[in-house]
Image (cartoon, grey):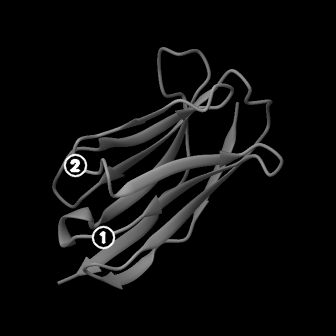
Amino acid sequence: QVQLAESGGGLVQAGDSLRLSCAASGRTFRRYTMGWFRQAPGKEREFVAAINWSSGNTYYSNSVKGRFTISRDSAKNTVYLQMNSLKPEDTAVYYCAANPSGSSWEDWGQGTQVTVSS
């Protein structure tokens, strides 16, 4: 099992930037895919971005491509989500998740709130 702890959320204005962090512990992550998801009020949780820990390959949803960047720091066991040009529709609770097998997201953090005002 992997323990995940998100941080960095907050209240910002449209057009601002924010960086989320996800500190991971409990296992080695070289074979993991790490991801970010978000859930807005009244909506289902949706995929935002993912990164393969060993290769560094990244994946993004169309709604954030070109604005958000996912990265990882192997020395710190931390995954980041740099969010630029934020929009009110980016308002949500953002969750970090770990996929150890390539088939399912098994471990989740507690979430961090991001609110973007217009």
Q: Estimate the x, y position of residue 31 in percent, counting from the top left.
A: 69, 21
Give the left or right position of residue 69, taking residue 38 as reference.
Answer: right
Q: What residue is rendered at 73% in x and 30% in y?
A: 29
The residue nearer to you, when weighing 101 against 108, is 101
| CA neighbours of label 1 inside 10 A, class few (<14), some (14 to 19), many (20+) | some
Q: Quadrant of residue 30?
A: top right
Q: In which quarter of the image is residue 22?
A: bottom right
Q: What residue is rendered at 41% in x and 42% in y?
A: 49
Instruction: Name which residue type carries label 2.
Output: Ser
The residue nearer to you, when weighing 106 against 91, is 91
Residue 70 drawn above or below residue 31:
below
Labelled disc at residue 16: none
Give the left or right position of residue 1, taking residue 34 as reference.
Answer: right
**Residue, disc 2:** 63
Mark 1 or mark 2: name the one nearer the start of the chain. 2
Residue 4 drawn above or below residue 111:
above
CA distance separating discs 1 and 2: 12 Å
Q: Estimate the x, y position of residue 7 in percent, counting from the top left.
A: 58, 66
Marks 1 and 2 in Cβ contact (< 8 Å): no
Q: Is mark 2 on a helix, strand or loop?
A: loop
Q: In which quadrant will I find the N terminus?
A: top right
**Residue, disc 1:** 85
Q: Is mark 1 on a helix, strand or loop?
A: loop
Q: Estimate the x, y position of residue 40 in percent, counting from the top left.
A: 24, 58
Instruction: Name which residue type carries label 1.
Output: Ser
Total label count? Answer: 2
Q: Which residue lies furthest to the right in this view?
A: 75
